[in-house]
Image (tube, coloured by chain):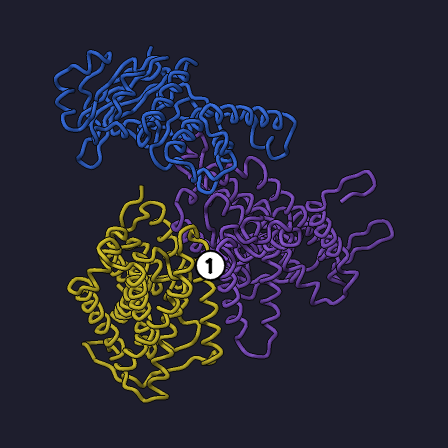
């Protein structure tokens, strides 16, 4: 049984099919990259898997459990967490505050325990703060910990977004174009970290435009075009397929 | 500052000491003054402060409720009906008022908190109006426009000491004080711990919070319900203090005033801001109402609120002046502006 | 079937709510805020007309124009000195909301101080009734309908056939792009606020003779036009018109049928609309 299964997934906006009959099986531990020109439905796919949209047709199974139709918070708590391209921040919060607020799923103690500040909560909180600091150091934003998150450069804001997604303990991490707007160094830094994340057992689904990044880490590639899946397989096979090359003509730099 | 072998960080201690002194002064206030009007103003301000705390808590989750006075009405009528029509003693009725108010808040909240921003606010306006109209027309329960007259709670005897609500406002003052402290502790604790942070994340970026595992509706409803409980209690107590409840006492305009007290006091501090806002605006309103020039109370009240909102720096309220004051007092010499080296070199 | 008189009254109410709602939506679509004191501009307009007629002897139609100009100007002052400051980036909705709410008290207090609290009547402006078959309609009420039609036509022309109107529509739809084309959103905001308040003022002026004039007369029209906007759809001018019509007629008919809880019915209806279809009839859907 695959970790994450999309069966016949279709999303209609009025008459427009943003996604049409997508079948996709995602295996545990792989680094799957979803690529395709603009408008091919990549972000819609993430929006449906994360629970933000309901599919018009089709289902999503996670570990055999039907999750299509659940709320985003229910899906996140089951272990599927996404990052955002834009809208990554909590207004007015510092880097550290953002991480602590974003650690909602990392806490093991309940709300009432936090209100009465029980010993169990205090220990839990210390543990969480430790993890937060560790992640911030990994993503090189530790130095700006008390600065407003909105003051970070776009690249670092994106790293903060990834760090926030990670502290939510994902089993599956959906990365929505994480390297957009980054220079080569920053992009490779993200690549290194994705490799580490994958090594720790997290299944990664990477939506990307930057083919250098994709070819560097993807174990499998799925290509979307106009809402349809036109290729699915190992990077070498997929990138040489005629349809894929045609779909990309003029829209991608390799 | 050194005191013997102990280093006292006067910067953090002094403001707290002053605050503590103020609290003690408030506690012994009835000993200092027996002026019934002044005491009544403080009692009323304290009660409104509790309602304001409720508003601010709901605001923490990103919602503006323009109907909080309706919960005071609900609490007030429940307590009044239980005591006057069913003969139930005051204190259980008082608690029941809070429970009923909370349950109604829960029910309403579950239904309407999914509407966002302005839509929710308008629904709360509509809700407040519905409560008022029902109170006005459901003669059988509420006696309509004439309202219900209530009696003070019976005297409480502790040892040789009798607390008599009927003969003086002082017992009302002390119970109000207790109520404000208890409510304040609850709201303060909620606001400063993790759940307060969760509320803020729901307000600051609902979509991001949701995708990080936060069930938005749950937290909005929690805030709204807690607010409902305490606002209902406040209403019940107020009605008993004033000995009457009518449909006009807790209408839309009172809800608006609650909102104003919150913003003017300062939304950053859920307890301090609410108390400051309620005290300032209630006292102002009361003082203005007794001016000989007709109608100037509305004019000046409105003007005062507009001016405060315009001239206080973005996002702050009167309560933030407290922090600024101490910052000024403790300002280090280096913080004074020194001319830049470059500027001096020009000469 | 309620008698014709109820429908006429409903129509009159529709006209007023429609006019006020139109003004509110205009302001909302450019400034992004609800002017909670909109009803008070209605009230002030009525007072201006009252004094223009009784104290200065200015003929009714001119008084209406005067009130539009004066109160419209007042609205522009409010926009410049209060609203503009409080809608700067970073403020959020809270402060401007509280400020416009506070202005309700301010204007009512000012009017109370300046003009007194007693109801003032203007019954002699357009006396007489028109007999239509079995019932009669006062000329004043007919004037309201005609006035509204005229206003709507003028608004249509201004918005669709003039440069100013074009600027307004551009700024409402795409403020950033509009500013790139040299349209100053600040100036458009001023103009729109002026128009919106002028509309409210003239609505108040023309209603003065129908009901009486007092400082609190703006409260109910404000709430009603708010409800009209909700039903019609926040941000939609067509919605304001349709919503106004629906609400005016509904209000009149329901009040006739159930005197007690008629307002409750309206409020419940609005709550339902907000829960089920918050964008109303013509508004843009949210998510």
Residue at position x 48%, y 73% in the image: C109
In the image shown, does B263 or B67 lie closer to the viewer?
Answer: B263
Percent of width and height locating residue B234: 61, 53
Vertical position of residue A210 compared to residue B9: above or below? above
In-image side of C21 versus B21 (left or right):
left
Vertical position of residue C6 compared to residue B68: above or below? below
Please tell me whether mark 1 sits on a helix, a strand or a loop: helix
Residue B282: in sight, yes or no?
Answer: yes
In the image shown, does B1 or C260 lie closer to the viewer?
Answer: B1
Percent of width and height locating residue B218: 48, 36
Crowd band around label 1 with a 10 angstrom C-alpha radius: few (<14), some (14–19), many (20+): many
In-image side of A212 versus B227 (left or right):
left
In-image side of A170 versus C49 (left or right):
right
Q: Quadrant of the C terminus of chain A?
A: top left
Vertical position of residue C22 compared to residue A200: above or below? below
Residue B80: in sight, yes or no?
Answer: no
In the image shown, does A2 or C1 lie closer to the viewer?
Answer: A2
In the image shown, does B191 or A94 lie closer to the viewer?
Answer: A94
Residue at position x 56%, y 29% in the image: A110
> In the figure, residue B162 lies in which quadrant?
bottom right
What's the chain of the residue with tag 1? C
- Chain letter, colour blue in render: A
- Residue on which disc 1 sits: C98
Vertical position of residue B213 compared to residue B278: above or below? above
- Chain letter, colour purple in render: B
In-image side of A77 versus A33 (left or right):
right
Percent of width and height locating residue C56: 34, 88
Percent of width and height locating residue B193: 58, 37
Q: Quadrant of the N terminus of chain A?
A: top left
> Color of chain C here?
yellow
Residue at position x 37%, y 29% in the image: A83
């Amino acid at each position: 049984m695959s970790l994450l299964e999309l069966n016949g997934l279709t999303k209609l906006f009025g008459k427009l099919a943003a996604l049409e009959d997508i079948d996709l099986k995602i295996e545990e531990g792989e680094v799957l990259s979803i690529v395709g020109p603009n408008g091919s439905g990549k972000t819609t796919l993430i929006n449906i898997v994360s629970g933000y949209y309901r599919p018009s047709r089709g289902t999503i199974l996670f570990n055999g459990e039907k999750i299509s139709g659940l709320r985003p918070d229910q899906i996140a708590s089951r272990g599927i967490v996404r990052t955002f391209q834009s809208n990554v921040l909590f207004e007015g919060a510092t880097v550290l505050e953002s991480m602590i607020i974003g650690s909602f799923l990392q806490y093991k103690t309940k709300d009432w325990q936090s209100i009465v500040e029980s010993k169990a909560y205090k220990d839990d909180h210390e543990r969480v703060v430790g993890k937060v600091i560790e992640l911030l150091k990994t993503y090189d934003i530790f130095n700006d910990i008390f600065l407003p998150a909105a003051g970070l450069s776009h690249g670092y804001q994106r790293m903060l977004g990834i760090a926030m997604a990670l502290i939510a303990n994902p089993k599956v991490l959906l990365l929505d174009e994480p390297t957009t707007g980054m220079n080569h160094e920053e992009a490779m830094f993200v690549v290194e970290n994705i490799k580490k994340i994958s090594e720790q057992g997290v299944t990664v689904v990477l939506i990307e435009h930057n083919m250098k990044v994709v070819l560097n880490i993807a174990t499998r590639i799925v290509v979307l075009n106009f809402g349809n899946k036109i290729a699915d397989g190992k990077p070498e096979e997929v990138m040489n397929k005629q349809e894929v090359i045609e779909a990309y003509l003029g829209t991608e730099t390799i | 500052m050194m005191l013997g072998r102990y280093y006292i960080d006067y910067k953090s201690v002094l403001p707290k000491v002053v605050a503590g002194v103020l609290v003690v002064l408030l506690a012994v206030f009835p000993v200092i003054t027996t002026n019934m009007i002044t005491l009544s103003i403080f009692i009323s301000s304290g009660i409104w402060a509790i309602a304001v705390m409720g508003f601010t808590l709901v605001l923490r989750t990103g919602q503006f409720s323009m109907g909080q006075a309706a919960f005071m009405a609900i609490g007030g009528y429940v307590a009044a009906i239980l005591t006057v029509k069913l003969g139930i003693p005051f204190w259980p009725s008082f608690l029941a008022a809070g429970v009923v108010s909370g349950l109604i808040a829960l029910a309403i909240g579950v239904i309407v908190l999914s509407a966002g921003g302005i839509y929710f606010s308008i629904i709360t306006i509509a809700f407040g109006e519905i409560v008022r109209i029902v109170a006005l027309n459901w003669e059988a329960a509420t006696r309509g426009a004439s309202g219900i007259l209530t009696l003070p709670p019976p005297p409480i005897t502790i040892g040789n000491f009798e607390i008599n609500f009927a003969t003086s406002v002082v017992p009302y003052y002390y119970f109000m004080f207790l109520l404000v402290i208890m409510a304040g502790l609850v709201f303060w604790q909620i606001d400063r711990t993790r759940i307060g942070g969760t509320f803020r994340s729901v307000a600051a970026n609902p979509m991001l919070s949701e995708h990080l595992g936060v069930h938005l509706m749950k937290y909005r409803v929690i805030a709204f319900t807690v607010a409902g409980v305490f606002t209902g209690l406040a209403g019940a107590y107020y009605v008993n203090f004033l000995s009457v409840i009518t449909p006009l006492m807790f209408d839309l305009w009172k809800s608006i005033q609650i909102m104003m007290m919150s913003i003017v006091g300062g939304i950053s501090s859920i307890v301090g801001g609410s108390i400051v806002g309620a005290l300032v605006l209630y006292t102002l309103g009361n003082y203005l109402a007794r001016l000989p020039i007709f109608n100037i109370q509305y004019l000046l009240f409105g003007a005062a609120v507009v001016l405060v909102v315009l001239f206080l720096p973005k996002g702050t309220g009167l309560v933030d002046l407290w922090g600024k004051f101490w910052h000024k007092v403790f300002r280090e010499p280096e913080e004074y502006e020194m001319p830049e080296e470059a500027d001096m070199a020009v000469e | 079937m309620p008698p014709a008189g109820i429908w006429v009254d409903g129509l009159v109410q529709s006209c007023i709510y429609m006019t006020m709602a139109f003004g509110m939506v205009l302001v909302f679509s450019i400034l992004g805020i609800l002017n909670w004191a909109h009803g008070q501009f209605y009230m002030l307009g009525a007072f201006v007309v009252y004094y223009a007629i009784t104290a200065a002897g200015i003929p009714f139609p001119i008084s209406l124009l005067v009130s539009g100009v004066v109160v419209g100007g007042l609205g522009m002052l409010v926009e410049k000195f209060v609203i503009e400051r409080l809608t700067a980036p970073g403020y959020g909705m809270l402060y401007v909301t509280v400020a416009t709410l506070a202005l309700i008290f301010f204007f009512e207090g000012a009017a109370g101080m300046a003009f007194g609290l007693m109801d003032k009547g203007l019954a002699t402006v357009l006396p007489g009734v028109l007999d239509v078959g079995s019932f009669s309609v006062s000329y004043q009420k007919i004037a309201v309908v005609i006035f509204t039609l005229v206003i709507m036509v003028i608004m249509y022309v201004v918005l669709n056939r003039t440069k100013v109107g074009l600027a307004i529509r551009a700024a409402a739809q795409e403020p950033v792009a509009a500013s790139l084309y040299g349209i100053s959103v600040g100036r458009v905001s001023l103009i729109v606020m002026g128009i919106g308040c002028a509309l409210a003022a003239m609505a108040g002026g023309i209603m003065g003779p129908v009901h009486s004039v007092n400082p609190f007369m703006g409260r109910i029209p404000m709430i009603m036009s708010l409800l009209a906007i909700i039903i019609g759809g926040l941000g939609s001018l067509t919605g304001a018109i349709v919503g106004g019509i629906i609400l005016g007629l509904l209000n009149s008919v329901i009040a006739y049928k159930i005197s007690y809880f008629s307002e409750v019915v309206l409020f419940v209806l609005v709550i339902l609309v907000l829960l089920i279809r918050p964008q109303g009839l013509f508004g843009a859907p949210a998510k």
